[in-house]
Image (spheres, rainbow, N blue to C red):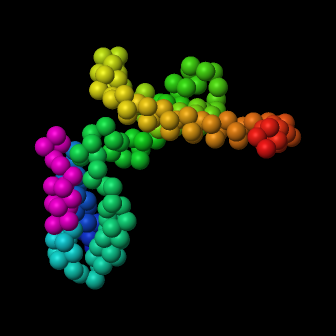
Amino acid sequence: MDNYKKDYQLVKRWDLRFKRIATIMDPSENKTSSWVESRLKQYLTQIEKELNREDDFAFVDNLMRYSKGFWKGLFTFYDYPLLPRTNNDLELFFRRTKVRHRRITGSRTWNRYIVRHGENIVFVENVKNEQDGLQKIRNATYSGYKKEVSKWDSRIHEHTKQRRFKQDPNAYLNNIESKWNRHN
């Protein structure tokens, strides 16, 4: 057991830093993204100063590279609580959405559902209850609604053309040729 005492002390020393980072990043209604980002930046600088032994170099280097890689977007959910905090939360959201879709349609694939409804899936799935949904609809402006309908129609139109071409390329191309001939 004595062979691992030094390694154990080292890992224990690093673990304290992870626990402190977790405390800083723990969600709370009082925390904003700017506060957490600032506090974490200060703490990472402190870690770089404190962990200066040769044994610490790999840990500090790895921690700084990972932090830098995930920094952008890491703090957004503090200001927007409806955003998933982690990728796991996002995966659970997709799983729940997929299960509901399967329950409603009986279809195991939901590719068409995603293509057809796109980002609007989020609006449907994020409604807490009927009253919440009605309130969100009431808050929408008519001009905003028309703009979204236009974008949706454009996306659906493109998808419809692709589907028609895949189903019967000759019929699709003949239809385009006949439209061309009528206009010329």
Query: From this viewpoint, which residue is outermost toward the top?
Result: 130
Query: From this viewpoint, which residue is outermost toward the left?
Result: 30
Q: Residue at x 28, y 46 (%)?
A: 77
Q: Is the magenta stretch mostly helix, strand or loop?
A: helix
| Quarter of the rendering occupied by the N terminus | bottom left
Q: Which residue is drawn at 82% across and 41% down?
A: 181
Q: In this view, does 53 lie above or below 46?
A: below
Q: Nearer the viewer, residue 31 or 58?
A: 31
- List x then y, in percent, for residue 138: 31, 22
Can residue 86 be seen in this snapshot? yes
Query: From this viewpoint, which residue is outermost toward the bottom?
Result: 54
Residue 39 found in image quarter: bottom left
| Quarter of the rendering occupied by the C terminus | top right
Please state if 100 lies on the left or on the right of 171 as rendered: left
Q: Is residue 63 above or below residue 170?
A: below
- List x then y, in percent, for residue 85: 33, 45
Can residue 2 be seen in this snapshot? no
Region rendered in magenta: 28-43
Q: Which of 17 and 153 is in front in this view?
A: 153
Q: Which residue is drawn at 62% across and 36% down?
A: 157
Q: In this view, does 50 lie above or below 161?
A: below
Please state if 67 lies on the left or on the right of 79 as rendered: right
Please state if 112 lies on the left or on the right of 87 as rendered: right
- List x then y, in percent, for residue 29: 16, 40
Magenta includes 17?
Answer: no
Q: Which of 20 and 158 is in front in this view?
A: 158
Query: From this viewpoint, which residue is outermost toward the front?
Result: 184
Residue 101 found in image quarter: top right
Q: How many labels does the image show?
A: 0
- List x then y, in percent, for residue 58: 34, 76
